[in-house]
Image (cartoon, helix red, strand yellow):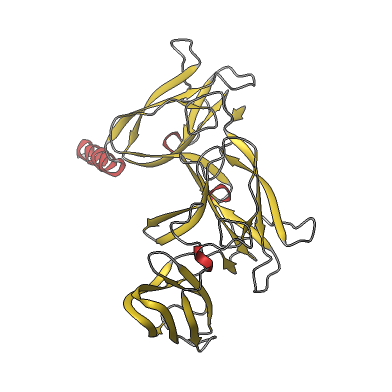
Amino acid sequence: MKKITLLFGLLVSLISFGQTHDVTFQVDMNYYSGAFTTPEVNGIFNNWCGSCSAMTDANSDGVWEITIPIADDSTEFKYSFDNWTGQEALLPGSSCTKTTGANTNRSIVITGDTVLPVVCWESCLACTGAPTSAQVTFQVDMSDYSGSYTDVNINGTFNSWCGACNVMTSPNNDGIYEITLTVPTDSIEFKFTLDGWTAQEDLTEGLPCTKTVTDASGTFTNRVFTPSGDTILPVVCWESCAACGFVGVEENNWVNDLKITPNPSSGSIQINGNLNTSEEYTISVIDVRGRVIYESTDYNNVISKTIDLTFAGKGIYIIRFSNDTFSKYEKIILTE
């Protein structure tokens, strides 16, 4: 009876942990400038145990590796050396990382036997001799912004969209705010916000400085940039890819006599306006996180639309009017 119980327990354990697969980890230490003896891999799968998963360099080519059986699942890890004497300082927002609180680790999903590509220490990419991080200066001109605010912030993949953690300054008090941050030399997404997430840029999809992504939580349009080294980005106007004063598609007056009433509203709004010609246009309602919560398309030269937003909750929202060429934006406030 005791043997049967033990066998049953072992079977339950195997089912609980799932099937395991051989995963080969490889890290290139050729460009690491410090001193070390033995690199190791530490992760969820070995309880971040220190030196228990020491790597080897059989070919003496500076690329260290180890193969470990790991169960089906997503997992996090990083490379370290000499029992945590040193470890990678991975940048949030890199394409191979996941950030939870103050911890940024490498992240993979295990579905079968896998040989991970060789990556450079503290990078998602192979070693090229190029820097893996860069000092980037971001600049935004708030001169044309008509609302009120206290702080201008930048939020992006490199700071985990943290809200108010990175406050920009205007050294010359000229309405141009700037900040210099260390970011990965990888594709980064970001946008400018106000007072944390009290307000944010509503960027037009398709503009040359933006990228639009759809995931389970909605559709987001953010600024996008891939630094190759230390960079000072040009000054851009709030919600534009260009400097203030440049007449772009987002500033075209293709919608006339536009009225949204009441504003503020308790939930139901009436939209009226006129177009220059009869054409197809889309009305979108966007929340402060950039998610489209309502959208409708009509064909006419007159806008007359009642929208029920009682489901949305109180706060600030952006109404976007767009056709194939132009876009126009208005802000509304829901009080209940």
Q: Nearer the viewer, residue 61 or 54?
A: 61
Please state the horizontal and vertical placement of residue 273, each as a whole percent of the image.
Answer: 44, 84
Residue 127 left/right relative to 245: left
Image quadrant assignment for residue 152: bottom right
How many labels were placed on the picture? 0
Please state the horizontal and vertical placement of residue 228, each as a whole percent of the image.
Answer: 57, 35
Q: Residue at x 28, y 34 (%)?
A: 112
Q: Residue at x 43, y 55 (%)?
A: 212
Q: Residue at x 67, y 60 (%)?
A: 141
Classify the position of the N terminus by image quarter. top left
Image quadrant assignment for residue 175: bottom right
The residue sitting at the top extreme is: 59
Please state the horizontal and vertical placement of residue 3, each as a whole percent of the image.
Answer: 22, 35
Please state the horizontal and vertical placement of residue 256, each as a whole percent of the image.
Answer: 48, 80
Q: Nearer the viewer, residue 252 or 228?
A: 252
The residue sitting at the right extreme is: 172
The answer, for residue 241, to whether it is visible in the render is yes
The answer, for residue 289, to whether it is visible in the render is no
Q: Relative to 14, does residue 210 appear above or below in the rendering?
A: below
Q: Relative to 225, does residue 42 appear above or below in the rendering?
A: above
Q: Residue at x 41, y 22 (%)?
A: 66
The residue sitting at the front extreme is: 277
